[in-house]
Image (spheres, rainbow, N blue to C red):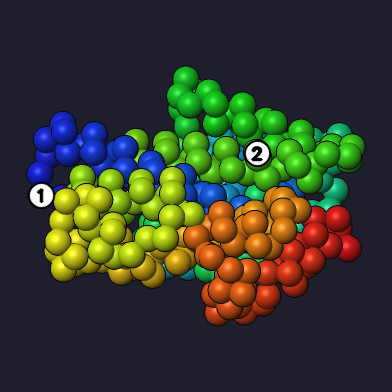
């Protein structure tokens, strides 16, 4: 992927912001097929925990106190209350009361303080959330971001992010019915707002951008019209390019050939529909551009290693906690 542009005009900046957010929306949508998990942790005194790498996207928010981020590579970083640690594609990291080596920290399952809802004060409170992908891979856009980075909302900045943090903290503590519906929505919003703020604070960072108007237009066509029987020739014609030029520019900007990207988006959206609706498989197949249920099923098995029906059954049981 070629994320940088040599130009600095306002028009180019607007183009890559608009198209970049289109891709970001698609990327956030793609992780929704995973299991939404969130928890709170409270620690005092000397503590530390190591989070293993996983397939998915997540974050850790320091609600109270101070801590140190211990990345797999690079130097430890001091954290303060309000800081958000993002792992866009599930990289290994550690959190601790003091700088240390990642290998010296205990695994999170052994280190986590189970008394997360105690009314007694603690030195440190953490809110952790993630989408775990049991099938499929993290979106290429998210994989092109730094493996771990920190967003530091100022006291007067991004009120929405702070309000969402408060809402998720309450949701995690709530045992009433309905968390299965509210938690994924809050995770979506938190990830989106945190990523947006990082982009605003790091405008010159090496991050994925789509600054080619023709390729941005093709992505919009794909994202809004997955059901159409697209070919490379049709996509290139829709944006006024030859097939050869379109394929070369699309692959350079997006990191995948057009049809590979289109297939990935179709199947990702199909997986979301399988999880979020009870629509028949034939209906879902048509909605994501497959003329037959058989064609959709074969492509789905190649991508996820499981049939659409089996995927829906597994996801339904996990959603019900079985």
Which is more toward the observer, 102 or 302? 302
Q: Quadrant of the C terminus?
A: bottom right
Could you classify mark 1 by the number of other residues whose Cα lies within 10 Å: few (under 14), some (14-19), or many (20 or more)? few
Residue beneath the point at 76% across and 53% down: 278
- Image coordinates for residue 248, horizontal then vertical, percent: 18, 67
As drawn, is 31 to the left or to the right of 158?
Answer: right
- Image coordinates for residue 300, horizontal then vertical, percent: 58, 72
Secondary-structure class at tag 1: loop
Q: As drawn, which residue projects farthest toward the front? A: 291
> Is residue 105 visible in this depiction of the protein?
no
As drawn, is 101 to the left or to the right of 177?
Answer: left
Image mark for residue 128: none
- Image coordinates for residue 169, horizontal then vertical, percent: 72, 36
Q: Which residue is mark 2?
A: 186
Separation (CA) of disc 1 from disc 2:
37 Å
Q: Which residue is mark 1?
A: 6
> Is residue 285 visible in this depiction of the protein?
yes
Residue beneath the point at 21% across and 45% down: 213
Q: State whether residue 125 is above or below residue 93.
A: above
Residue beneath the point at 43% across and 55% down: 228
Q: Quadrant of residue 262?
A: bottom left
Marker count (numbered): 2
């Amino acid at each position: 992927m070629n994320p940088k542009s040599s130009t600095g005009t306002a028009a180019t900046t607007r183009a890559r912001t608009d198209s970049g957010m289109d891709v970001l929306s698609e990327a956030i949508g793609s992780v929704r097929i995973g299991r939404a998990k969130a928890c709170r942790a409270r620690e005092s005194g000397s503590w530390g925990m190591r989070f293993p790498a996983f397939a998915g996207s997540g974050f850790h928010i320091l609600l109270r106190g101070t801590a140190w981020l211990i990345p797999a590579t690079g130097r430890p970083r001091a954290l303060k209350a309000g800081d958000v640690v993002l792992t866009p594609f599930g990289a290994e990291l550690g959190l601790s009361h003091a700088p240390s080596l990642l290998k010296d920290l205990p695994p999170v399952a052994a280190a986590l303080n189970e008394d997360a809802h105690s009314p007694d004060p603690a030195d440190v409170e953490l809110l952790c959330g993630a989408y775990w992908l049991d099938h499929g891979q993290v979106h290429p856009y998210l994989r092109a971001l730094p493996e771990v980075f920190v967003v530091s909302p100022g006291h007067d900045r991004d009120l929405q992010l702070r309000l969402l943090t408060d809402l998720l903290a309450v949701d995690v503590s709530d045992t009433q019915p309905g968390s299965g519906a509210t938690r994924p929505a809050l995770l979506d919003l938190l990830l989106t707002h945190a990523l947006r703020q990082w982009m605003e604070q790091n405008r010159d960072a090496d991050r994925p951008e789509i600054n080619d108007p023709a390729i941005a237009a093709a992505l919009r066509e794909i994202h809004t019209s997955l059901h159409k029987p697209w070919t490379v020739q049709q996509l290139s014609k829709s944006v006024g390019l030859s097939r050869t030029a379109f394929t070369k520019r699309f692959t350079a900007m997006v990191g995948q050939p057009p049809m590979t990207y289109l297939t990935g988006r179709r199947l990702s959206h199909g997986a979301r529909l399988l999880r979020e609706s009870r629509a028949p498989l034939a209906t879902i197949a048509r909605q994501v551009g497959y003329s037959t249920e058989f064609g959709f099923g074969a492509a789905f098995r190649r991508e996820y290693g499981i049939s659409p029906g089996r995927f829906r059954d597994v996801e339904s049981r996990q959603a019900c906690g079985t």
